Amino acid sequence: MQEQASEWKERIVGFIDLGTNSVRLLLVRINRDKSYTILSQRKETVRLGEGEFITRRLQPEAMDRAVLVCQNFTQMARSKGAEEVVALATSATREAQNRKSFIQRLEKEANLEVHVISGKEEARLTYLGVSSGINMEDRQGIFIDIGGGSTELAVGDQSEHFMLDTLKLGSIRLTMIFPATNEGFVSSEQYRTMQGYVRDTAIRTLQKAHRYRLEMAVGSSGTIENLADIAIRNFHQRRREPDDVLNHDELQGVVGLLCGLSLEERMRVPAINPDRADIIIGGAAILDTIMQELGLKEIHISDRSMRNGMLVDYLNRIDGVDSEQELSFREASVLRLGRALGFDEEHARHVARLALNLFDITREQELHNLTQRDRELLEFAAMLHDVGMSLSYSNHQMHSYYFLTNAELLGFDQTEIATMATTTLFHRKKFPRKRDREFAALDERSQEIVRILGVILSIAEGLDRSHMSLVRDMELELVGKRKALLKIQATQECPLEIWGVEFHGKAFRKAFKRRLTMEVVVDDQEPVVETPAS
C-alpha cells in the first residue's frame, strides 16, 4: 500500500539484510522531497548458514551470533533516531526447518520484526539496488549476486528487469557440499566436480538467460568484490578502482592460485578477506561457471546490494515516486499470476471491492483492529481466490493455496504470501481450526489475521456467487450486543448471493461474536424482510 505524499515527513529508516554469511545495515535519512542521505553502513559476518545446508536447521551458535548482531544494529539505528527498521531474511532462514523459532528470537531478543523473502524477491531487490547505482546507458545485461546460500540472477536494463531467478548455489553451501582437505587444498579434479554441480543446478536458468541480449554483466556481493580485489592486486599490483572490471581470464588465474594453497596460506593472499578464505573457492566456482556458460569475458563490479534495493523499493512505495499510471510490483505480480492462470478478472475485481468495503465497515464498527497492511493482503487474496479453478472447480481453494504458495509473488515476504494463501484456502471451508495443517503453520498473529480475512473474503465471494456483480454496496449496523445487520444494495434480485452469505453465517459469528442477519434493498424496490444468515 503506497503512502500518500501528503502524509510524508522526513524520517530516518534502517534497512537490515539478514543473509547467509553476513548481516548488513543501511541507515538513511529520507527527506521530504524523497531524496536521502546515507548515515551509516555496517556489515558483520555471522555465518548464519554454517552447518545448515546439511542438517536443514540453523545451528544454535549461528543463531546466537545473528541475534547479537541484529540487537546491536537495531539499537544503533534507534539511537540515531530511526522510526522504522525494515529487516529481511534470505536463503539460510528461508530454508531452515526451525526458522519460526529463530524469527521469534529476533522479535523477542532484538526487538526486530524480520520478514523472510523468496529467492526471486531477493533477486528483484538486488536488481533494484544494483541497477540504481550503475550507468548502463541503453544497454541491457545480466546481474549476478552470489551469496552464502543462494545465487540470484536478473536480466534487465537501467529501469526494468526482464528475468529473475534464484539458484540454490552459494559460497557456504557449495563449500559444505564439497569440503576441502583438512589443510584446505582443492584439487583441480574437485574444482571441476564443483563446476559440474553448478552447471547442472543452473542449466535451466542459464538457458533462459541465453535468450536475452547480454551486452554487459554486473556482479555484486562480497564474494565477487573480493575476487575482483584479489585479481587486481595480484595481476595489476594496485587497489581496485570503482570502474574496474573482473576479467574472466584473470578470474581463472585467481582460481588456480587459491586452489593450490592451504587455508592458512590462502588467508595471507594479498587483498583477500581472511573471513572468506575458506568459502571463496566455492563462490569462485559459481562465478567462473556462469561466465563460461554465458560467454562473459568480463564483469563490472558493484558495491551495492539488496539493502540498497530495499531502500529503492521503500521509496517506490511512497506516493509520487512511481508514475501514477504504473502498477506497484505487488499489484503487477498479482495480476500476472491471475492472468497466467486465466482467472475471471471481472469477478475477482468485484469480490476484492466488496471485501475491502466489508473490511472497512467492520473496522469502523470496531469488530476488528487489523491494519492497512492487512487490508492490502485481503485485496490481493481476493483477486487470486479462484485461480485454482485453472486445475479444477472441485477443491479449487486448495489449488489456489498451492499456486499462491509456490508462485514466488514479487514484492511480498514469505509471511505475507502464507497469509494470503491461507486466506484463499478458507474462503470455501469452515472456520479455520488449530488442527488444520496450513493454518497451524502460521504464527499467532498471522492466524488471527486469517481468521478475520478468511471470513470477510468468504462473505464477499458469497455476495458475487452468481458472478453477475449484482451487489453494488453494503452497510453494517450493530443491533444490541449480539447481532449485526448487513444491509445489501443490489441491482436486482440476488437469491444466490443471499444463500452465499447464509452459508458463512457461523463463521461470521465465530470471528466477530455476533449473529449476522441481512436486509436486501433492490434498486427501485422496497427492502426485503430481514433474513438470518446463521
Image (cartoon, grey):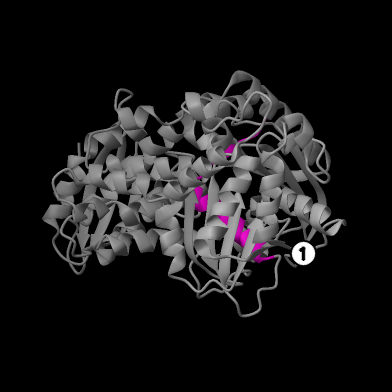
Q: Is residue 215 toward the left or the right of residue 356 in the image?
A: right
Q: Residue furthest right?
A: 238
> Eyeballing the image, is 405 above or below 110?
below
> Eyeballing the image, is 246 above or below 433?
below
Q: Residue furthest bottom?
A: 138
Q: Is residue 119 magenta?
A: yes
Asked if one can make out residue 147 in the rendered structure from this viewpoint, the answer is no
- Look at 13% across and 45% down and name the residue there: 394
> Eyeballing the image, is 390 above or below 136?
above
Total tally of numbered discs in the picture: 1
Q: Which residues are magenta?
A: 111-132
- Look at 43% across and 56% down and name the residue there: 205
Amino acid of disc 1: Asp
Q: Residues within 10 Å of mark 1 (few under 14, many from 20)?
A: some
- Look at 76% across and 45% down and name the residue there: 82
Q: Is residue 92 toward the left or the right of residue 254 in the image?
A: left
Which residue is more in the foreground, 171 or 7? 171
Q: Quadrant of residue 175?
A: top right
- Look at 61% across and 19% down and name the residue there: 60
Q: Is residue 84 toward the left or the right of residue 437 in the image?
A: right
Q: Is residue 183 magenta?
A: no
Which residue is more in the foreground, 155 or 418? 155
Give SS at disc 1: loop
* Residue on which the image places disc 1: 244
